[in-house]
């Protein structure tokens, strides 16, 4: 209690250096401090939290199916989006993300990582992430894709500008035996020496 009174007295002297400190003023000081505390708590609660770029990317990729359905059922006449390869998926992702990720860069087969040439689908150096798009083309591919993804993770562990690796996996025919288990396997942080690599997964539809 004595320590609390000393603290209140010190605060009072800072705010009112010329006014004498008396015990009668303590309740008033305490009441003012409580109001300040409650005001700060309210301001903190009502201040909107800004989402990180990677969170916005994941939210956008999660709406991939809705975007495709809209484009394929729109009132105006136009080309129908048909997905038969990873290139088709990549094109759609680029159109979805490029307007607000200005440095989103498509595949760059000339960048050498760990003595091998890495072909990444898209990267943002400013936001330090890479997006890998996969198209599951058969039952065999659905069963073996985990090995392909593990190889990608091993490649990007060396990448100097990749802190977040996002896997977007388009599986229109549900060839992946257990998509939840695959997502759980991928969505974790991995530590390689002093480098951390955060992996994310969005599996659609």
Image (cartoon, helix red, strand yellow):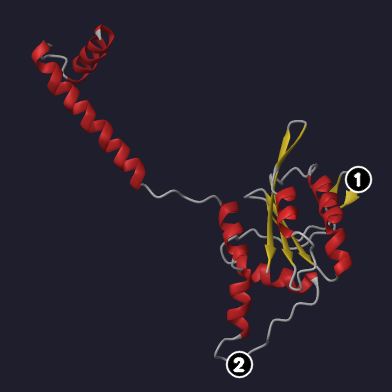
| Contact flag, marks 1 and 2 (Cβ < 8 Å) | no
Secondary-structure class at tag 2: loop
Res. 127 in view: yes
Left or right: residue 46 compared with residue 186: left
Q: Nearer the viewer, mark 1 or mark 2?
A: 2
- In the figure, is residue 112 to the left or right of 58? right
**Quadrant containing the N terminus in the rendered view:** top left
The residue positioned 75% from the left and 77% from the top of the image is 83
**Is residue 122 shown to the viewer in this render?**
no
* Residue 158, horizontal then vertical, whole percent: 80, 42
Most foreground residue, 119 or 30: 30
In the displayed image of the protein, which residue is found farthest to the front?
177
**Of callouts 1 and 2, which one flags the residue occurring earlier in the amino acid sequence?**
2
What residue did someone put label 1 on? 115
Pinpoint residue 75: horizontal percent, then vertical percent: 54, 90
Q: Which mark is residue 93?
A: none
Residue 117: x and y, percent? Answer: 88, 53
Place residue 21 in its image quadrant. Answer: top left
* Residue reaching furthest to the left: 24
The number of callouts visible is 2
* Quadrant into which the C terminus falls: bottom right
Residue 77 is tagged as 2
Under tag 1, what secondary structure? loop
Q: Is residue 104 above or below residue 200?
A: below
- In this orientation, which residue lies closer to the viewer: 177 or 27? 177
What is the distance, in whole Å, between disc 1 and disc 2 at their CAs? 48 Å
């Amino acid at each position: 209690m004595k320590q609390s009174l000393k603290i209140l007295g010190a605060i009072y002297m800072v705010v009112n250096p010329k006014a004498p400190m008396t015990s009668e003023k303590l309740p008033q000081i305490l009441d003012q401090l409580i109001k300040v505390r409650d005001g700060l708590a309210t301001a903190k609660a009502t201040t909107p939290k800004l989402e990180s770029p990677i969170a916005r990317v994941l939210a956008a990729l999660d709406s991939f199916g809705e975007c495709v359905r809209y484009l394929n059922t729109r009132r105006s006449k136009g080309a129908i989006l048909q997905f038969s390869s990873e290139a088709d998926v990549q094109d759609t992702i680029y159109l979805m993300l490029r307007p607000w990720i200005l440095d989103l860069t498509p595949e760059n087969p000339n960048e050498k990582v760990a003595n091998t040439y890495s072909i990444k689908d898209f990267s943002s150096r400013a936001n330090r992430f890479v997006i890998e798009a996969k198209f599951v083309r058969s039952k065999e591919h659905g069963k073996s894709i985990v090995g392909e993804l593990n190889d990608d993770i091993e490649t990007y562990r060396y990448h100097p500008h990749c802190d977040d690796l996002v896997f977007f996996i388009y599986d229109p025919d549900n060839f992946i035996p257990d998509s939840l288990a695959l997502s759980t396997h991928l969505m974790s942080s991995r530590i390689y020496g002093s480098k951390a690599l955060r992996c994310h997964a969005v599996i659609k539809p």
